[in-house]
Structure formats: structure tokens, C-alpha cells
Amino acid sequence: MTGSPTAATALVPPDRTSPADPTSPAATDGAPAHVVHPVPDGLTVRGTVLIVPGRGERAAVYTRLAARLAADAYRAVVVDADTSSVASLTTLVGELIGIGPAPLVAVGSDTGGIAVHDLAAQGTPGLAGAVLAGLPVPRPAPAPATGSLGWHDELDARTACPVHRERLDGDPRLTRGALLREPVEAWTARRPLVPTLVLHGGSDVISPLPALVEHLRGAVDRAVVVENGRHDVLNDLHHRSVAARLVQFLESLRRDPLARPVLSEVTP
């Protein structure tokens, strides 16, 4: 698959779904707006992946990842908002479970990862697994130095991938400065009640790896570190390797946990 966002969009044309009627009594807990990337014709759907963006982001940021997942026969549903309550995501999970197929796995990036962490820790019905990417450590207020940082500083903090940088730079709906200046409210790391994959960039300056490891101590057993990876670890320079690891995780949820590994190595 190519690294071009245009090619990814052509492969899997997304369907936009509107949020609940805001005049409805249940509107505050209604499912958020989202974009669906269906599996290409001829493939049997293997599961559903819910992607929750982080600060400043909208659904378009994850077009490349969603297309990759759809090409591997996983229907991708991307929330089209940079802030989603756990209640609204719980509603959306319930709706997606009703449509099928299982397993349903939630993937969250940045503050979206905190929301997915909460879904996993509360034992959300129907949720089979969680992926927490670029989790931010709590930061009640931005550091004073961030006031002098500009858009290109944020791009550098986000990614080294030229294709992703171009997408971010040309996205009219992306909120520039949000990643550097919006605070991260205090949150407590709890042990997830479903299988969970943690992905984090080894060179993340927004949420430095040592600080995150300390914050997650006792809540998760391990994390996958992307060498030289920056904050947007799902879309960074090594996005193919990260997506492959994500698909491996998805496939593991479809198998009997007591079964032997599908792939093994022998020494000639």
C-alpha cells in the first residue's frame, strides 16, 4: 500500500455519519460524528476498529491508517472530533456492536488514548481490546516556553513522516497549536479489563517515554516502543511497522488464547 493519503482515500471511500440530533434528550450521551471506512468488495470483514483522535485532530488525520486496516479486512470507524466523552464513545461502541462484526477494538491517540483507556478500564460491554498510542502524561498547564513555539515546532513534535506532515499542514480542520498548548487533565492509570496494546514513540517530546512508563506503572505490563518515533506514532515515519503490529494484535483477539502461535521460528 502506498503512503499517499489520496491513494488511501481512493481505496476505501469513507461514509460520513452524523451525530445524534442535538435536540434529543439523550444528545449529550449520543454517539459522536464519525467516518466509516468500509472493507473493499470481495473481502470478508474480520472485525471493527474504532479510532479516537487526539488534541486538534479530526477524522481525516487517520485516513491512511483506516485505509490500511480496511485493506486488511477490518472496518475502520474514525471519530470526527478531537474531544469525545467516555459516555458518547460507550454509546458508539454499543451501536457498532449491534452492526457487527466482532471483535471490536478501540484505538486512541493522544487524549483519545485516555478516553479509550477509560473504556477499557470500565469494562465497556462489547469492547474486545484497546490500543493506546501516544498517551499523554498529565499536564495541568502548558509549559511557559510553548508560547514561543509555532506551527513548525508542533509539526516536528508530531512526526518526521513527510506525507503525514503534508497532510497536517494542508488540513483546514486541524486546530494548530492544540497539541502544544491545551492542558492534559489529571488522569489515573487503571488496569484495563480487556487485552491492551500500548504504542509509544521513543523520541516523543510531548509525552516523554520515561514519564509515561512511570505513570502507567502497575496498570499495564508492557509497552511497544517505536525507535525514534515521535508523538503521532500511528502516522509517523514507521507507520507501516506500527500498522502491522496493530493488525497482529487484532488477529490475536480472533484466536483461542490457548492456541499455539500462528507463526513460529526454527533454527536450521
Image (cartoon, rainbow, N blue to C red):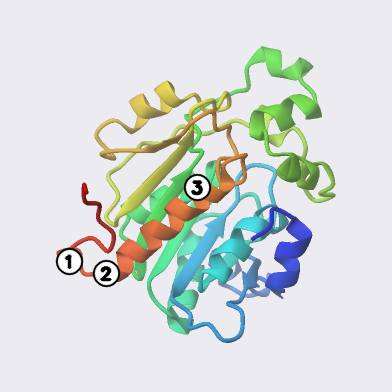
Residue marked by disc 2: 255
**Is residue 260 visible from the viewing direction of this image?**
yes
Residue drawn at 25 percent across, 39 percent down? 221
Q: What element carries label 3?
A: helix
Please tell me in which quadrant of the rendered image residue 5 appears. Answer: bottom right
How many angstroms separate mark 3 from mark 2 (CA)?
21 Å
Circles 1 and 2: CB atoms closer than 8 Å: yes
Q: Which residue lies furthest to the front in this view?
A: 268
Residue marked by disc 3: 242
Q: Judge from the rendering whether residue 145 lies leftward or rightward of residue 227; answer left or right.
A: right
Residue drawn at 55 percent across, 33 percent down? 229
What residue type is disc 3 on? Val
Q: In which quarter of the image is the N terminus?
A: bottom right
Please tell me in which quadrant of the rendered image residue 100 appears. Answer: bottom left
Residue drawn at 42 percent across, 63 percent down? 105
Q: Residues within 10 Å of mark 3 (few under 14, many from 20)?
A: many
Q: How crowded is mark 1: few (under 14 residues within 10 Å), some or many (20 or more)?
A: few
Residue drawn at 39 percent across, 55 percent down? 130
Q: Is 164 situated above or below 74?
A: above
Q: Judge from the rendering whether residue 61 lies leftward or rightward of residue 208; answer left or right.
A: right
Query: Where residue 30 sits in the image (x, y, percent)?
Result: 56, 69
